[in-house]
Image: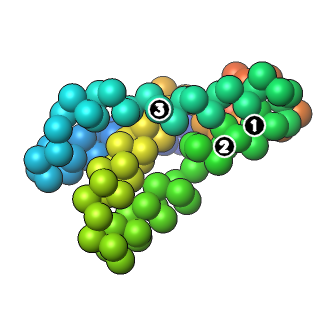
Amino acid sequence: MTNKQIVHVEYALAFALSIFIYMQLHFPIGLFLVLLFVPDLTMLGYIINKKIGAIVYNLGHTFILPLLFALGYLYFSNDDLLLGSIIWIAHICMDRAIGAGLKYRDSSFTNTHIQRL
């Protein structure tokens, strides 16, 4: 296996694990399906230009914010933060499993960090 293939498999397994954890916590699966693609709304930044689009898209497709949601859950004991965190992480893992990675500010939408592995 190449390094790129290993990365794709790792993210596919992380996506599956996210679904498993979500289901073990008895969160509604219908809500998972509805919210799974919400982070893709960050693509709307590309309406402005490539630079803003990449910044907004990358903000919605890094693990920083969903992990902060998970920390918020630990501090506030708010299940909605955990639910959102798991779905957001699942979305990122799903995207990376199919090769949709972080975007570069000066290139096309399809040019991602995963393609350069």
- Residue 54 is marked as 1
Q: Are marks 1 and 2 in contact (CB under 8 Å)?
A: yes
Q: Amino acid at mark 2?
A: Asn
The residues bearing labels 1 and 2 have C-alpha atoms spaced at a distance of 6 Å
Q: Which residue is mark 3?
A: 38
x, y (%) of residue 68?
A: 48, 65
- Report x, y in % for residue 32: 28, 35
Crowding around mark 1 (Cα neighbors within 10 Å: few <14, some 14 to 19, many 20+) is many
Identify the residue at the far bottom of this view.
Answer: 75
- Mark 3 or 1: the one toward you: 3
Q: Quadrant of the N terminus?
A: top left
Rendered residue at 33%/67% (across/down): 73
**Which of pointers 2 and 3 lies earlier in the amino acid sequence?**
3
Question: What residue do we see at 78% from left, 22% from top?
Answer: 47
User: Residue, x 37% and y 33% (percent of image)?
Assistant: 35
Dot 3: few (<14), some (14–19), or many (≥20) neighbours within 10 Å? few
Which residue is pictured at 76% across the width and 26% down the height?
A: 46
Q: Amino acid at mark 1?
A: Ala
Q: Is residue 26 left or right of residue 106?
A: left
Residue with the mark numbered 2? 58
